[in-house]
């Protein structure tokens, strides 16, 4: 039996597009997007028989992240893949949603990432997410908070949520329009 599937793999290779190798671009897409496809394709065979849930880890970087075009493209691709799989498997009682957590405790929070964010916000004056400044309301997005949202998305309590994105930042948990 398989009741739910959580895709939470990720690598980053931060570089500006002019300095990014094709190998770095391909490696990031292979892990962050194609890897999700592979597990969903395999898991779908089981989930279609009984229903269940798939939760894919995306990222606020998918909204656009200076110096990380490969990662941004992969994580935004996860959202498109999530929406499509939700439509394909919905008739079998399988839900598929994406989570975009803003977490400082992530292994992805390496100095190069903070350098790109600092340059983007302080030098260029561009907010973190499109036209929104991130407001954590003094609360860091803890891994257990993200896990709680993911567990909820895997439970029957969220049976009316399918093909959606959930954004988590500090005290904010919101469905992305």
Image (cartoon, rainbow, N blue to C red):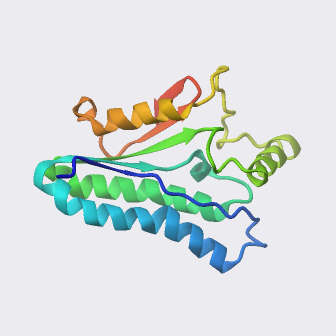
Q: Is 82 located above or below residue 122 in the figure? A: below
Identify the residue shown where x is 59% and y is 38%: 102
Judge from the rendering whether residue 66 lies leftward or rightward of residue 141; answer left or right.
right
Picture quarter containing residue 125?
A: top right
Picture quarter containing residue 155?
A: top left
In the image shown, does 67 or 141 lie closer to the viewer? 141
Where does residue 153 sit, x and y in percent of width and height?
33, 37
Judge from the rendering whether residue 94 lies leftward or rightward of residue 131; answer left or right.
left
In the picture, the quarter occupied by the C terminus is top left
Identify the residue shown where x is 67% and y is 20%: 138
Residue 88: in sight, yes or no?
A: yes
Where does residue 11 sit, x and y in percent of width and height?
59, 60
Q: Is 155 located above or below residue 18 in the figure? A: above
Where does residue 103 sit, x and y in percent of width and height?
61, 38
Identify the residue shown where x is 57% and y is 52%: 62
Seen as rendered, the residue at the extreme left is 49
In the image shown, does 60 or 114 lie closer to the viewer? 114
């Amino acid at each position: 039996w398989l009741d739910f599937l959580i895709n939470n793999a990720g690598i980053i290779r931060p570089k500006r597009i002019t300095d990014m190798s094709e190998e770095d671009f391909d490696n990031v897409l292979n892990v962050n997007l194609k890897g999700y496809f592979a597990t969903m394709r395999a898991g779908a065979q089981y989930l279609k028989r009984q229903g269940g849930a798939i939760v894919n880890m995306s990222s606020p970087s998918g909204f656009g992240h200076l110096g990380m075009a490969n990662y941004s493209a992969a994580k935004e691709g996860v959202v498109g893949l999530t929406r499509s799989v939700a439509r394909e498997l919905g008739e079998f009682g399988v839900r598929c949603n994406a989570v975009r957590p803003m977490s400082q405790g992530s292994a992805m929070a390496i100095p190069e990432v903070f350098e790109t964010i600092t340059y983007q916000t302080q030098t260029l004056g561009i907010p973190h997410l499109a036209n929104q400044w991130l407001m954590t309301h003094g609360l860091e997005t803890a891994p257990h908070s993200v896990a709680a949202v993911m567990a909820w998305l895997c439970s029957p309590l969220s049976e009316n949520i399918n093909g959606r994105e959930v954004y988590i930042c500090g005290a904010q948990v919101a469905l992305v329009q």
